[in-house]
């Protein structure tokens, strides 16, 4: 039977369900690979990697959008965050976990980002397709209330027009998302928006706690300016175009001018059932 609860109740509900599971499921022995049926948790640290982890977690952002300044990028390819958590809610992940690098196509491409229309004459429009890839810029706290996600956005082009290190956000100056299912409280000109709590259900057959069809929102965060964006002329003359990118994209962008909507599914499970 499904029921709705806030993210703050995830661990309490999961703990009660896992206590019931312990009566019928034997403790699993440690292994380096997840058991069949639990391979989605391969980013969760094994007992030999991190002894303090008690549960495994995975969430998938299925769709939505991410707006910074004047640029609004639809989320068309799923983004997954996978790892493990301790009894106190601390999150960690191994080399197979963390945030997957899903490239999202940026409307307007490189020309829309830089305003350099003459690039089309040299490279053609198809070669100027632009992608935005969300990467972690710090330690996430997906089970916090609200969930916290520090990120940076990698701006990429297959022909290398922007160089290989064109980013908005960094580990020292991340884009700090505080994802809510309730109402936001942004500064103007943004107005409050509301997310959606997930439909939650515990599967006694597998021990997996499912959270389905939820929506996270945040329109209170600030976005820094671009860095590391370099246009190389004639193959050997590098020119910084951070200023062009910032001007065309409305960056840096103060809180109240940005927004993300993330439609998600998530799963939590006791690690002893995974390994």
Image (cartoon, rainbow, N blue to C red):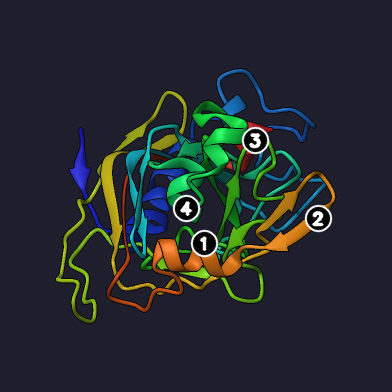
Which of these two is toward me, 186 or 73? 73
Which of the two labelled residues, at mark 1 and mark 4, occupies the earlier sequence position? 4
In the displayed structure, 265 sits above or below 153; it is above
Residue occupying the point 65% across, 59% down: 229
Question: What secondary structure is found at the residue carrying circle 4?
Answer: helix
In the displayed structure, 185 sits above or below 56; it is below
* Residue 59 in sight: no
Residue 204, quarter of the rendered image: top left
Which of the two labelled residues, at mark 2 and mark 1, occupies the earlier sequence position? 2
Residue occupying the point 21% across, 36% down: 2
Which of these two is toward me, 140 or 165? 165
Residue under label 2: 237
Give the numbered dot on residue 245: 1
Give the numbered dot on residue 139: none
Measured in 3D between alpha carbons, the distance from the residue under mark 2 to the one under mark 1, in whole angstroms, is 18 Å
Which of the two labelled residues, at mark 4 and mark 2, occupies the earlier sequence position? 4
Residue 135 pos. (x, y %): 59, 52
Residue under label 3: 27
Which of the two labelled residues, at mark 3 and mark 1, occupies the earlier sequence position? 3
Question: What secondary structure is found at the residue carrying circle 2?
Answer: strand
Q: Nearer the viewer, mark 4 or mark 2?
A: 2
Quarter of the image where the C terminus is located: top right
Question: What secondary structure is found at the residue carrying circle 1?
Answer: helix
Measured in 3D between alpha carbons, the distance from the residue under mark 4 to the one under mark 3, in whole angstroms, is 53 Å
Which of these two is toward me, 162 or 39? 162
Residue 98 pos. (x, y %): 63, 47
């Amino acid at each position: 039977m499904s029921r709705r609860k806030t993210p703050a109740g995830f661990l309490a509900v999961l703990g009660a369900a896992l206590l019931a599971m312990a009566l019928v499921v034997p403790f699993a022995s440690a292994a380096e690979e997840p058991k069949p049926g639990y391979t989605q948790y391969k980013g969760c640290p094994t007992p030999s990697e991190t002894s303090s982890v008690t549960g495994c977690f995975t969430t998938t952002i299925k769709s939505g959008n991410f707006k910074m300044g004047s640029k609004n990028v639809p989320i068309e390819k799923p983004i997954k965050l996978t790892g493990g958590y301790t009894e106190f809610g601390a999150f960690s992940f191994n080399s197979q976990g963390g945030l997957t690098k899903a490239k999202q196509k940026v409307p307007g491409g490189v020309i829309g980002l830089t305003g350099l229309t003459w690039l089309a004459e040299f490279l053609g429009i198809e070669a100027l397709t632009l992608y935005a890839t969300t990467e972690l810029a710090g330690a996430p706290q997906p089970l916090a209330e609200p969930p916290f996600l520090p990120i940076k956005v990698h701006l990429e082009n297959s022909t290398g027009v922007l160089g290989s290190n064109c980013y908005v956000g960094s580990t020292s100056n991340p884009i700090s998302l505080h994802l809510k299912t309730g109402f936001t409280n942004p500064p103007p000109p943004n107005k409050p928006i509301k997310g959606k709590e997930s439909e939650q259900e515990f599967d006694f057959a597998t021990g997996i706690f499912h959270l389905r069809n939820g929506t996270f929102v945040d329109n209170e965060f600030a976005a820094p300016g671009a860095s590391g964006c370099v246009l190389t002329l004639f193959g050997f003359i590098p020119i910084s175009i951070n200023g062009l990118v910032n001007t065309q994209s409305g960056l840096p962008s103060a809180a109240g001018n940005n927004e993300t909507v993330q439609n998600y599914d998530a799963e939590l499970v006791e690690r002893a059932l995974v390994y």
